[in-house]
Image (tube, grey):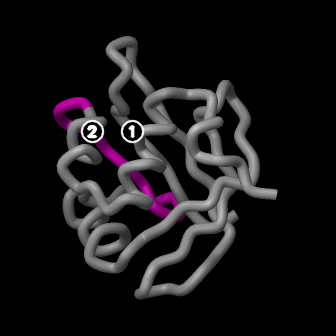
Amino acid sequence: MTIKTAKLSDPAVRAFVTAVNSSDRERFRDLFTPGATMADDGSDRDLDDWIDREIFSSNGHIDVDNESNGGRSLLAHYRNDAWGEMVTRWDFTVEDDGRISRFETGQA
């Protein structure tokens, strides 16, 4: 059963999912601290390159199945035009100012 995006517990994570699902690149970038980092399947990636390739140029979409860690860890169905649909995990580090400094994703 999918959790509605508006019901996600953590405001930064909720904004992340909303920006991905609405293809709002500008809003998405505003969610991050300067120098934010990310990893995919355990390997650090260039954030700007990855989000362009895996989210915005390939119509990425997240349907959240479960959340934990105060809403900062998600289990979700992720799909895009490049890879199709897969079950993924997402873990976020959110700073005191409410912006994301790191996220890690990969197949669950």
Residue 19, relative to residue 57: is it above or below?
above
Q: Mark 2 to mark 1: distance in Å?
A: 5 Å
Residue 27, relative to residue 12: is it above or below?
below
Report whether 68 appears left or right of 45: right
Q: Residues within 10 Å of mark 2 (few under 14, many from 20)?
A: some
Dot 2 or dot 1: first in sequence order is: 2
Q: Position of residue 8 (x, y in %)?
A: 62, 36
Asked if the residues shown at circle 2 and circle 1 are in contact, with their CB atoms under 8 angstroms apart, the answer is yes
Report whether 85 appears left or right of 45: right
Quadrant of the image for the N terminus?
A: bottom right
Quarter of the figure with residue 24: bottom left
Quarter of the figure with residue 78: bottom right
Residue holding disc 2: 36
Q: Position of residue 7 (x, y in %)?
A: 64, 36
What residue is drawn where x is 42% and y is 55%? 39
Task: Point out the stretch of residues depicted in magenta.
Answer: 33-42
In this view, the residue in front, 88 or 58, is: 58
Magenta segment, prevailing SS (helix, strand or loop): strand
Residue holding disc 1: 102
Three-letter amino acid code of the residue under disc 2: Ala
Quadrant of the image for the C terminus?
A: bottom right
Q: Residue furthest right?
A: 1
Three-letter amino acid code of the residue under disc 1: Arg
Residue 19, relative to residue 98: is it above or below?
below
